Image (cartoon, grey):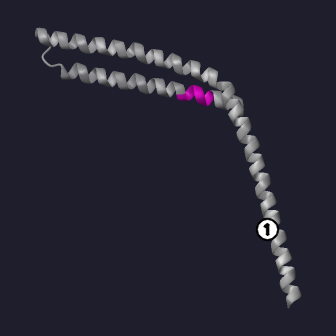
Amino acid sequence: MKQVISEKRVQYTLYLKRQLSKNQDRIQAEKIALDRLSKSLAGISDKFKNELEHQLEIIKVKDEQSKKIVEESQKFATEGEVASTTVPIAITDEKVGSYKIQAITTILDDFENIISKNFC
């Protein structure tokens, strides 16, 4: 009986050792993959940063245009040419939201293209 228990302990110990070895191999593979991914992301960050800065400039220009439209609509409203300022402001808000969404969509598409070119 003692011999059977001893054999089972040895088998269980060997099983645990194999599992630990598999886990260590998996962790090493994940570390290598993560290191490659971080190096690749560092390599494309300059390209992506330039695109982000370009989209930011577009947003700033369109913000200025939106502010001018709002100011003009308020100016016309005070002069009596426009009955209500809520409609132009609402339209302007929709335009502001739409170009910001468009910029984010463009950024995400560019990022996806960069990732697919470098990792697939």
Quarter containing the C terminus: top right
Q: Residue at x 77, y 47 (%)?
A: 29
Residue 66, x across and y down, in percent: 32, 15
Which residue does the image show at 36% across and 26% down from the upper left?
97
Q: Nearest the camera: 76 or 67?
A: 67
In the depicted structure, whether residue 77 falls above or below residue 114: above
Q: Position of residue 24 (x, y in %)?
A: 78, 55
Residue at 83% from the left image edge and 85% from the top image edge: 5
Q: Is residue 15 left or right of residue 56?
A: right
Q: Residues within 10 Å of mark 1 (few under 14, many from 20)?
A: few
- Report the span colored magenta: 108-113
Give the residue at the far left of this rendering. 80
Return the x and y of residue 115 as percentages of the image width and height: 65, 31
Quarter of the image for residue 20 reads bottom right
| As drawn, 100 above or below 8 | above
- Residue 95 pos. (x, y %): 34, 21
Query: Which three-letter amino acid code belongs to the residue tagged 1?
Result: Leu
Which residue is nearer to you in this view: 85 or 13?
A: 13
Residue position marked by numbered label 1 in the rendering: 16
Task: Inspect the magenta stretch and tell me whether residue 110 lies in it.
Answer: yes
